Amino acid sequence: MNENKIPLSEYPRPQFKRDSYICLNGYWEYAIRKEDKTPSKFDGQILVPFSPEVEKSGVNKTVLPDDYLFYRLNVELPKDFIKDKVILHFGAVDQIAEVFINDQFVMKHIGGFLPFEMDIKPYLDGNKGTIILRVQDTTNSSYHSSGKQSLKPEGIWYKPQSGIYMPVWLESVKTGYIESIKITPDIDEKVVKISFKSSNKSAKLNLKNQIYAIEADKDNIISIKDMRLWSPEDPYLYEFTISNDVDEVSSYFAMRKVSLMQNEKGMKVIALNNQPYFMKGVLDQGYYQDGLLTPNSDEDYINDINLIKSLGFNVSRKHIKIESLRWYYHCDRLGLLVWQDFVNGCTKYDFWLNQVPLFVRYKINDHRYKKFFRENEEGKREALNEFKETIDLLYNCPCIVYWTIFNEAWGQFDAKEIYQELKLIDPTRIYDHASGWHDQGSSDVKSMHIYKWKVKVPNRFKLKGRAYVCSECGAYILDKRLKEAKKKEGFIYLLFNNKEDFQKEYIRFVNEEIKPCKNKGMSGFIYTQLSDVEEEMNGFVTYDRKEIKVDIPVIKEINESL
């Protein structure tokens, strides 16, 4: 394959970059079988990293829960590439993956939304190897995190997809390499704390041509003079390198702080860099018509981010999905705040638990595991571990200011206790323990979804000393196929068939609902949503991203009036 035609071949880890890199995206062999034995003959070729359910992959077949999906790739590595370790990276494989190199089992990974890696050098035959990946995907038939995927897609639930859907790549390193870094800015003390892991304990940090001696496994405190704060209006990044005798990585950080503070009316509000900062966001599900969870190119990420900003928003709520690290990098450098959801599992969508609270506000104690379909202890342990891994993966990203633990009770359990545990791991960000409903009276915000009724600020007693956000609202449908020219009432949403009426309604919504709430202390809102997705037609842009359905200046002007 021509190097220029390899999909998504950009370096996949911009905030921890080294020179060693071989992209393994491209054509692999694939097979779908009912038995777990590696087939002697494969079915054909699949274009990685597109899932087999996606036409673009060249397969266009659905992998069912009782299927085994096999991948095979023969690699011959340049001999001067190979050092002490050859690390194979998978950006994400949905959902249960077993890796074999030259018919030798290497590792098993469970979870369809997080990356994993392994040293494959001990299994290579010199510089050659055959990679076999065996995958199973239960979709939403088990307790594993499945996001918005469903075996019976309709409404807010989307087509299932399986297997590799993020880049696959190799790097090679020497013993004593820099394994990871952790970056914590502190604008109050005007320092940044940088720690790294390595068996080689000493290293040098180069920041703006100034060299600092640093040590592994400790917070190295670097003073930042003439500090330039990061914000959506000025997304300034400090670039640096860490090097030792055998390795060098390049990275970046930003000096920014997110916190709660009390406003002049005595209400808690979200602050950016010690100043109240109103969060104006869109729900961003990261789905693409051609690739579902996988974009066609890096430009798709950039275009979405630029569109959000051009519409006058400053936040993407990344909904029930973890993106490629390149997406967060573009948010960092372009200046877009991110409210990051953890990915939940939802084995059953229950009318009384998940839908009725949209119309009748009530809450259930989430220790009632049977009611929330969370009786399986292994499933709860797996979910909590994934939440922690998500924080570890994305901790260094300046754009992320907010973690959402559970959404609308999907797979919810012990939200109060989980918030308390995770806040100790990452105390630098805002937490939303129960977005929508079944609030357990905990976390940093009171978070509500309001579609059917007018957006209002709850009384202080219900807030319990927390900030208030409307983490989903609006969701007006603009679909030119509708026959009626004026808005009409849907089951939940308002329906329009022309942008003029849609825009009038959006302007009214901001002026009559959001502005009064902002004046009463609301910290932010998330409008649903950025793009159409399958049956959902409530996006500012079509599913294929070919048509922006509104006049950008009109939406931008009213949003900026906030």
Image (tube, grey):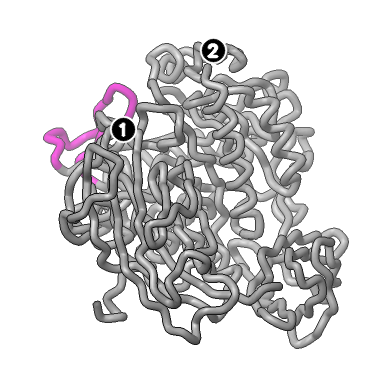
Task: Please say if 286 is above or below 303.
Answer: above
Find numbered disc 2 in the image and state the secondary structure of the residue it sits on. Answer: loop
Amino acid carrying mark 1 in the image: Ser
Task: Please say if 122 is above or below 372.
Answer: below
Mark 1: give few (<14), some (14-19) or many (20+) Cα within 10 Å: many
Image-based side of 297 in relation to 204, left or right: left
Which residue is rendered at x = 30% and y = 33% of the image?
A: 65
- Check disc 1 and report the residue beneath it: 150
- Along the line of sight, the residue nearer the viewer: 402 or 117: 117
Task: Please say if 355 is above or below 287.
Answer: above
- Along the line of sight, the residue nearer the viewer: 283 or 23: 23
Which residue is rendered at x = 25% and y = 66% of the image?
A: 27
- Check disc 2 and report the residue beneath it: 362
Q: CA distance from mark 2 to mark 1?
A: 27 Å
Q: Which residues are magenta?
A: 481-498
Task: Please say if 389 is above or below 490.
Answer: below
| Quarter containing the N terminus | bottom left
Disc sitting over residue 479 in the figure? none
Which residue is rendered at x = 53% and y = 48% of the image?
A: 280
Find numbered disc 1 in the image and state the secondary structure of the residue it sits on. Answer: loop
SS majority, magenta: loop
